[in-house]
Image (cartoon, helix red, strand yellow):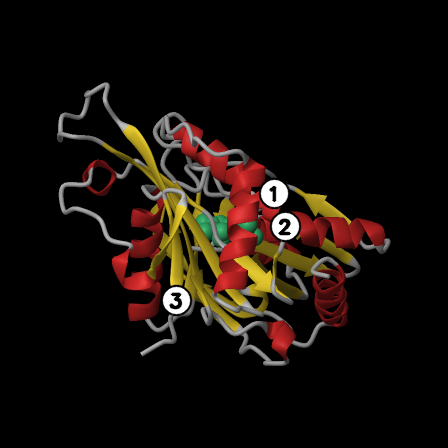
Amino acid sequence: MEKKAEYIWYNGNLVKWQEANLHVLTYGLHYATGAFEGIRIYNGKPFKAEEHYKRFRQSAAVCKIDIPYSDNELIEATINLIHQNSLESGYIRPITWLNNQNLILSSPHTYCEIAIAAWPSFYNSGISGQKADPLNLTIAHWKKAPKNSFPNSHKTTASYMVHYLVKQSAVTDGFDDALILDQDNRITEASTSNFFIIKDNEIITPKAGDFLLGITRNTIIDIANDNGIKVSQKQITLQDLEKLKPDAAFLTGTAIEMRVIESISYSGKTIEFNTNNSLFNKLLHLFHGYVMQHSH
Ligand code: PMP
């Protein structure tokens, strides 16, 4: 079994892992009224904690959850949790959900519950020297819900029901993951990561739309801008990909960091990419340097 951290921060207190439990009638479990985050620990420190907790509060607000702790209190709790669990690397999962004394959907007596859990090992970090395998992707059968039907750009627990289905069917069909299209057939994101392509000396990523604007995505954009690498944010359809014939493509996210894509297959077609692209390699190197520099 995977190694577990000893403590979880739960509604303001550090409790033993096995004691951080919920009741089966928890309101948020039944009605998917929850929001969460994923934060990496590098060098014993949470990476980009301010950005993650800002997004956490925004996602919670979409579920009408008012978190009764300030961002600073949550960051302090996170730093203390890392310390108490003696973690140098790993992953942090803050989560908040609504609870209630009954199951009436419209009850006014809902209240916020909140926990911050730590995982000593979640995904191996590329930074620890592991060379990750290139990814083979497909296109999800599920599309993003129309803009006026779901809060697609927040990290709510509800959005992961579809992302779970997307990931499960991709894996069942022999792929690593799938890209999800929006209602206008534009590429949005993969199940837990953002999408980039490289053409000549430019990196291109879908412009803000019905998907989560990843903190890793922002980091890559900042790194590119700081290093004179051209970045564009634009709408990308599968037809655009076929016409543009990108040199390389990759996914970004807290858990997977930066992972190169080998192929995207759909409707009997396969688009292949160079998995040893020099601009990708340069960005990966710059990303590793950035992460190290920002976790001291
Ligand atoms: N999209 C989705 C659906 C995700 O779950 C994640 C992971 N949080 C991302 C994108 C990437 O976001 P980040 O870089 O902030 O981890």
Tell me if label 1 and label 2 are in contact, CB under 8 Å. Answer: yes
Residue placed under numbered mark 1 in the picture: 51
The secondary structure type at the circle numbered 2 is: loop
Say which residue appears at 17% left-offset and 46% top-offset: 23
| Tag shown at residue 48 | 2
| Rendered position, 86 above or below 153 | below
Judge the density around disc 3: few (<14), some (14-19), many (≥20) Cα neighbours within 10 Å.
some
The secondary structure type at the circle numbered 3 is: loop
Mark 1 or 3, which is nearer the eye?
3
Q: Is mark 1 within 8 Å of ligand 1?
A: yes
Q: Earlier in the sequence, mark 1 or mark 3?
A: 3
Residue placed under numbered mark 3 in the picture: 6
Q: Amino acid at mark 2?
A: Lys
Inter-mark Cα distance, 3 to 2: 24 Å
Inter-mark Cα distance, 1 to 3: 26 Å
Mark 3 or 2, which is nearer the eye?
3
Judge the density around disc 2: few (<14), some (14-19), many (≥20) Cα neighbours within 10 Å.
some
Left or right for 134, reference 121:
right
Q: Amino acid at mark 1?
A: Glu
Q: Amino acid at mark 3?
A: Glu
